[in-house]
Amino acid sequence: MSKFTTQHEDFRNLQRRLLYLRTGLLFCLLLLSARLWYLQVVKGTYYHELAEQNRVRTVDLKPARGLIFDRHGELLANNVPSFNLYLTVEDIRDRDGMAAALEELIGLPRAETMKRLIQQAKSYVPILLKSGLTLREAALLEGHRLELTGLRVQAESQRNYVHGPLGSHLLGYVGEVSPEQQEEPDFAGLVQGSIIGKAGVEKTYDRMLRGKPGEKTIEVDARGNELKTVAVVEQTPGDDLYLSLDLRLQRLAESLLGAESGAIVALDPRNGDVLVMASSPAYDPNVLSRGLTPALWEQIASDTSHPLTNRALQGQYPPGSTFKIMVASAALESDKWSADTKVRCTGAFSSGRHVFKDWKRGGHGVMDLYNALVQSCDVYFYNVGQRLGIDTIAETARLFGLGQPTGIDLPSERVGVVPSIEWKQRVRKEPWYPGETISTAIGQGYITVTPLQMAVAIGAVSNGGTLHRPRLVRAVRERATGRVQEYPSVDRGPVPLQEGTFHLLQDALREVVLHGTGGRARSRSISIAGKTGTAQTVAARVTQLSTDEEAIPKQFRDHAWFVAYAPAEEPQIAVAVLVENTGHGGTYAAPIAKALIEEYWKDSDVDDRHQIAGQF
């Protein structure tokens, strides 16, 4: 091969290599161009927004919740200034160091901080880390602001219950919306950290009370610190509620219950207004509304006295002898019994192999229906129950609203049990036995009611047969417009009994207080009609404990009932009192009802309707 040929071959190889190199360079250029096109065109908007988030942030402005007043315009719930700690995860450089610093500065557990950081792995949306910072805590955090990037202390309003535990079950409390609740339609659009009602009026009327949030657009530096405000959309405060509650009476009712567990409900039988709803023991809603920690919740949930239970509408108790009102009504409406039907009470009643005793040893003698109600004669009503049968009694009880919701504007109402043959077969898969009717006739056995139901029922007796839906909110004032919307009272319908039935009940209930078992409710200032009741606990019935009340452990003692209304001639207030494990209703519950009614009567000439209108 000649030298010329060799040089030619080398030249061709060189050209081939240059071609490969140019092709490779062209391919890399095309690949780079495609990548740039993808980043700038396809993903341009995404990266533009990401860059904007590094420069511009949106801060949610939480509205102040609406105020809550009683029927006389007394403030029950308002808002106070509070410092809250927010955290933006993307701005944090050292998560472990941040958690350690917060534990050292403000005592926030490191594990709790890390848990929140993991839940919110990457986000420019601030999350609420701690609410209700003290002034000292806020100052400490502001002093370390340069090291603690991603943290922001923000001044906001915090819910405040002016009278602490007073009326806590009725008012409820507030708390942070949970991730699960954010998925529900009622809370759609709420961001993490938003405050919602968790119980009571706060929960039922949450949408009105919470208002409409606003937002502030701010420009931040590389550390996430605010430089200037770009734009602001103002928040709208929540609407104000005016309740039917009488704060003065509520305070008295709770003091009358004292350390005892129980409930007091007082209604206006003319329209269903809830004047009092007391449940004991109570809780402080301010504690629950200002950052409920798992440890605190565990402490409250494990309390054997169940302070979170609203006994007025969630406590289900045997009604005892107060149920004789319904049994007497069933008898008067039946062709199997009459007001003149007489029974000789010797202190005991035999049914099969079982002997049912009367509360009065030795008996009451010969009784008609009127006197049996006045003296609360058990033997008389044993006979009535045996004659009528359980289904007739159950049907009349339901006419008074028992065994069904009252319709009150509060969450989680319980309905109790009105037993019948069908109910026992359906629920317990067992037949109904005659002896069970005997027990039910004096308000024992399977039957259970709530104090609220009994207040509604005695109210219907007092007004001649109108069942009212209990009304808690009387009016709402819209903060945005100033417009006032008044809520009318609602009738659930009449109790379809004869007029004569109501007249006999009313006469007998007045005599109960004047000369019967309710003598401790007798007042010199106002005429009171009512009915006592003593309900055995399940444990007391099972263990057949001693009849010596002082010898019985307190948790096994009877519940004391008293239902009443006043004035007996033209009723304006209906009351149900239930005190757990204290003994006889005439001894323990009747004096409470008397004190509450007398306090009400002191200012009975005030026209609340005009007074509330004058508040706006």
Image: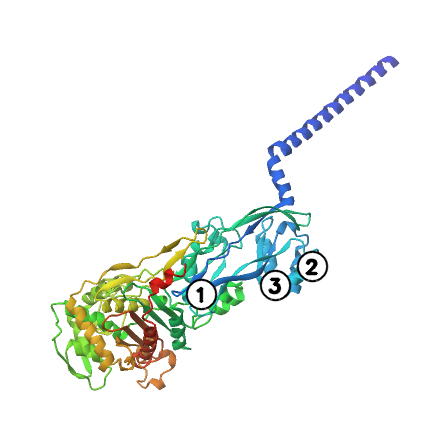
Label annotation for residue 144: 2
Which quadrant would the N terminus be assigned to in this image? top right
Marks 2 and 1 sit apart, C-alpha to C-alpha, by 38 Å
Classify mark 1: helix, strand or loop: strand
Q: What amino acid is at disc 1?
A: Leu
Q: Which residue is mark 3?
A: 109
- Seen from the viewer's position, the closer of residues 416 and 586 is 586
What is the quadrant of residue 4 in the picture? Answer: top right
Q: Dot 1, crowdedness within 10 Å: few (<14), some or many (≥20)?
A: many
Mark 2 or 3, nearer chain start: 3
Classify mark 2: helix, strand or loop: loop
Q: What amino acid is at disc 3?
A: Pro
What is the quadrant of residue 612 in the picture? Answer: bottom left
| 336 left or right of 106 in image | left
| 91 left or right of 284 in image | right
Residues tagged 3 and 1 counted as in contact (Cβ below 8 A):
no
Q: Dot 3, crowdedness within 10 Å: few (<14), some or many (≥20)?
A: few
Identify the residue at image location x=37%, y=66%: 245
| 411 left or right of 29 in image | left
Mark 3 or 1, nearer chain start: 1
Q: Which residue is mark 1?
A: 76
Mark 2 or 1, nearer chain start: 1
Give the image location of residue 579, x and y in percent: 35, 76
Give the image location of residue 136, x and y in percent: 64, 65
Q: What amino acid is at disc 2?
A: His
- Seen from the viewer's position, the closer of residues 602 and 26 is 602
Identify the residue at image location x=35%, y=83%: 552
Marks 3 and 1 sit apart, C-alpha to C-alpha, by 34 Å
